[in-house]
Image (tube, grey):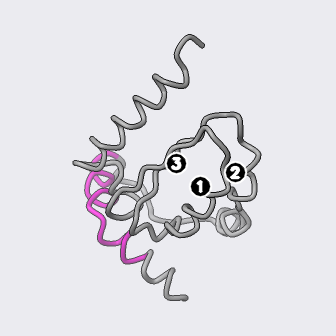
Amino acid sequence: MCAAARSSEKVWASSEFLNGPITSRAPSWKKEVTLRSVERFVEYEPQTYVPMISPTPFLLVVAEGDHLVPADLALKAYESALEPKKLLVLPGGHFEAYVDANFATSIEVQREWFRTHLRGK
């Protein structure tokens, strides 16, 4: 197993976000992935399409310590996007964007983004 995979596994194994609430909401849930899913994940390259999104507004939320979508790759993809675009970088890992202060920050930025770009549509 490569270092990135070991590091990612530590995040998954120690994350209260994943392992705490999920056990009460879905007691039969298993932390497993199919081989087909892994193959598709490895082949997935959304950064290839980012420059083609314009003129659709593009908001990218990046977690600095993300082990699933490394921040440097996300930032590189953002740089290739055309306007209109906005970047929000949050501290923490992939799932920390969905809880506590990071969520409060992220949701406010997203709400304003949608208000701006969906108004009157």
Classify residue 102 as left or right of residue 5: left
Residue hosting label 2: 50
The disc at residue 60 is 3
The disc at residue 97 is none
Q: Residue at x 33, y 35 (%)?
A: 108
Which secondary structure lies at badge 1?
helix
Q: Which residue range is magenta in the image?
A: 9-25
* Residue lying farthest to the front in this orientation: 83
In this rendering, the answer to whether 59 lies above or below 16 is above
Classify residue 94 as left or right of residue 55: left
Q: Are marks 3 and 1 in contact (CB under 8 Å)?
A: yes
Name which residue type carries label 1: Tyr
Residue 66, x across and y down, in percent: 43, 66
Q: Are marks 1 and 2 in contact (CB under 8 Å)?
A: yes
Which secondary structure lies at badge 3?
strand
- Dot 1 or dot 2: first in sequence order is 2
Residue hosting label 1: 78
Q: Give the quadrant of residue 105.
A: top left
Find out whether residue 98 is within the magenta segment.
no
Q: Residue at x 71, y 42 (%)?
A: 53
For label 2, the crowd category at 10 Å Cα-Cα, with few meaning under 14, some 14 to 19 and many 20 or more, is some
Residue 52, x across and y down, in percent: 76, 46
Residue 4, x across and y down, in percent: 50, 82
Instruction: Give the dominant element type of the magenta stretch: helix, strand or loop.
Output: helix
